[in-house]
C-alpha cells in the first residue's frame, strides 16, 4: 500500500513538473498574436486546456492577452503576467495590433532591434541582457518597441513582459483625473485673480501690472486649453 502511494505521488509530481515546463517554455517562445476578450461575463484563465482545470484568473470583456500559441480549441496566453489557457471561442485573434504592453526585459546576452518585423530588416540598435524596452505594438511575432530613443522591432521570444496592461490603464486613468483636477484649480485661480485685479487695481502703475497678469492669464489658458 505504501509503495502504491509512493508511486502515485511520484506520478503526480512528474505531471506537475511537465506542466510547469510547458508553461515556462510557452513564456519564452515566439508569440503568435494579440487576443481581445469577447465575453460579457468575463473569461477564465485556466491552468490547463480544460474546463475542469484550476482557474488562475478571470479576464474582463475587452481585456488584451498575448497569445503564445493555439492548443486545440484553446489559446495558451499571457494575461497580466500569468500564463495559462483561454478558450478560443471568446477571443478575437490579431496578428498585428497597436497595443501598449509596458516595459519588457531583454533575455539573451544580446538582442537585435530591427527597423521592421523581420530578420532581414536593417539593424537599428542592440540591447543587452536585462535591458528595458517599452512595448507599444505587435506585428507577426515581433514586439514594436522604443529603446534608447529609437523605435524598432524585437522578436517576442527574446523579451519577458514586466508590467500588467491593466495597471497601465489604471495609471493612465489616474493621470487623466489629476490633469482634470489641475485644470479646474487653475481655472478657478485665474478667475479669482482676475476679479481681484479688476476690483482693487486703479493707479496707472497698477494698471500696467494688471495688463501683465492678464497676458499671463491668456497664455496659461491657451497652454491648458482653458476657458473661463
Image: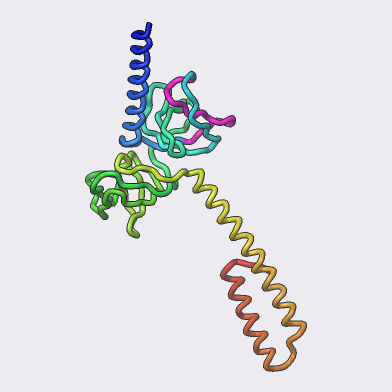
**Which of these two is toward me, 204 or 189?**
189
Please indicate whether residue 124 sits to the left or right of residue 167 in the image.
left
Tell me the magenta residue range. 36-51
Residue 96 vertical position relative to residue 4 in the rendered view, above or below: below
Q: Position of residue 20 (x, y in %)?
A: 36, 28
In the image, farthest residue toward the right = 199
- Identity of the residue drawn at 65% across and 87% down: 209
Q: Residue furthest bottom?
A: 204
Name which quarter of the figure residue 142 lies in. top left
Q: Please check the rendered image and state whether residue 184 is part of the magenta-colored stretch, yes or no.
A: no
- Is 192 left, or right, of 64 in this rendering? right
In percent of width and height, residue 67 lies at 40, 34
Query: Viewer-proximal residue, 80 or 188?
Result: 80
- Work out which quarter of the rendered image holds the N terminus and state it: top left
Q: Quadrant of the C terminus?
A: bottom right
- Of 118 and 59, which appears nearest the observer? 59
The answer to which quarter of the image holds residue 74 is top left
Instruction: List x then y, in percent, for residue 103.
Output: 40, 49
Amino acid at each position: 500500500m505504501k509503495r502504491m502511494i509512493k508511486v502515485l505521488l511520484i506520478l503526480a509530481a512528474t505531471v506537475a513538473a511537465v506542466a510547469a515546463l510547458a508553461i515556462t517554455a510557452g513564456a519564452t517562445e515566439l508569440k503568435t498574436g494579440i487576443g481581445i476578450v469577447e465575453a460579457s461575463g468575463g473569461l477564465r484563465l485556466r491552468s490547463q486546456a480544460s474546463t475542469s482545470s484550476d482557474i488562475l484568473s478571470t479576464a474582463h470583456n475587452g481585456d488584451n492577452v498575448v497569445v503564445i500559441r493555439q492548443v486545440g480549441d484553446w489559446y495558451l496566453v499571457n494575461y497580466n503576467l500569468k500564463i495559462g489557457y483561454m478558450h478560443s471561442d471568446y477571443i478575437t485573434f490579431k496578428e498585428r495590433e497597436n497595443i501598449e504592453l509596458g516595459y519588457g526585459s531583454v533575455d539573451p546576452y544580446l538582442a537585435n532591434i530591427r527597423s521592421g518585423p523581420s530578420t532581414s530588416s536593417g539593424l537599428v540598435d542592440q540591447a543587452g541582457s536585462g535591458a528595458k524596452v517599452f512595448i507599444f505594438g505587435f506585428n507577426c511575432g515581433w514586439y514594436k518597441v522604443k529603446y534608447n530613443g529609437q523605435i524598432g522591432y524585437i522578436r517576442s521570444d527574446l523579451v519577458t513582459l514586466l508590467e500588467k496592461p491593466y495597471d497601465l490603464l489604471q495609471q493612465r486613468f489616474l493621470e487623466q483625473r489629476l490633469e482634470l483636477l489641475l485644470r479646474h484649480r487653475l481655472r478657478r485661480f485665474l478667475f479669482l485673480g482676475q476679479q481681484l485685479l479688476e476690483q482693487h487695481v486703479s493707479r496707472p502703475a497698477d494698471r500696467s501690472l494688471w495688463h501683465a497678469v492678464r497676458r499671463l492669464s491668456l497664455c496659461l489658458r491657451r497652454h491648458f486649453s482653458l476657458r473661463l
